[in-house]
Amino acid sequence: MVSSPNRHDLVFPKGGWEDDETVLEAASREAMEEAGVKGILREDPLGVWEFRSKSSSMEADCCLAGGCKGYMFALEVKEELATWPEQENRERRWLNVKEALELCRYEWMQSALEEFLRVMAEEGSTKEDFIDISSISNRGERQIDPQYCSVVN
C-alpha cells in the first residue's frame, strides 16, 4: 500500500487512465508510478466499484459530476524499484492482509482485498497461474507494455 499525498492514511495505487491506454495498462503504470513496483497483473479485475472522486472529473471513467468507476487488479510483485516517480510524495508500506484491511482508507478497497482473498482461496492459485506477457499472442489492437507488467488470463 502507499500513503496518500498530504495525508497519513493508506491506499492501493490508483488513478485514471489516458485515452491511449487500457485499464490494465493504467493499473500497471499506477503501481509503478505510485508504489515503485512491477510485476504480473491478473487480467480479471477483482471488481468494479463506483465512488465519488474529489480530485478530478477528467479521469477516464469519471463523469462531470465526479462519479467514477474503480477497477482493482491483483499484482504479483516481481520487482521493487529503489526509485520511482512519486516516491517524494508517497511512502510504500508492505503489510499483511489483516493490517491492510484495518488501515485501508476506502471501503471499496477493503472489498477488493476481501475479493482477492476469496478468489485466491477458491482457485487455489499458485505461481503457475501467472503467465508472462511474452507468451500471449496478439491480444487485439495492442499489447500491454511489458516495462510495467505481465498479464494473466
Image: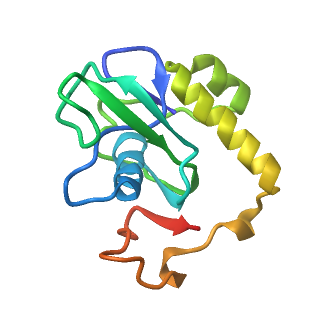
Nearer to me, 86 or 68: 68
Image quarter of the C terminus: bottom right
Query: Looking at the image, is 75 positioned above or below residue 64?
Result: below
Colouring style: rainbow
Nearer to me, 25 or 78: 25
Query: Looking at the image, is 91 positioned above or below residue 32?
Result: above
Q: Viewed as shown, does residue 6 lie left or right of 38?
A: left
Find residue 137 and report its horizontal and vertical position in percent.
47, 85
Seen at 33% across and 38% down, the residue is: 15
Q: Is residue 4 visible?
A: no
Q: Viewed as shown, does residue 15 lie left or right of 19?
A: right
Find residue 7 and report its horizontal and vertical position in percent.
37, 14
Find residue 144 and report its horizontal and vertical position in percent.
38, 68
Query: Looking at the image, is 64 positioned above or below residue 83?
Result: above
Q: Viewed as shown, does residue 108 lie left or right of 8?
A: right
Query: Looking at the image, is 50 positioned above or below residue 77?
Result: above
Q: Is residue 16 visible?
A: yes
Seen at 64% across and 17% down, the residue is: 102
Seen at 72% across and 47% down, the residue is: 119
Find residue 124 and report its horizontal and vertical position in percent.
82, 56
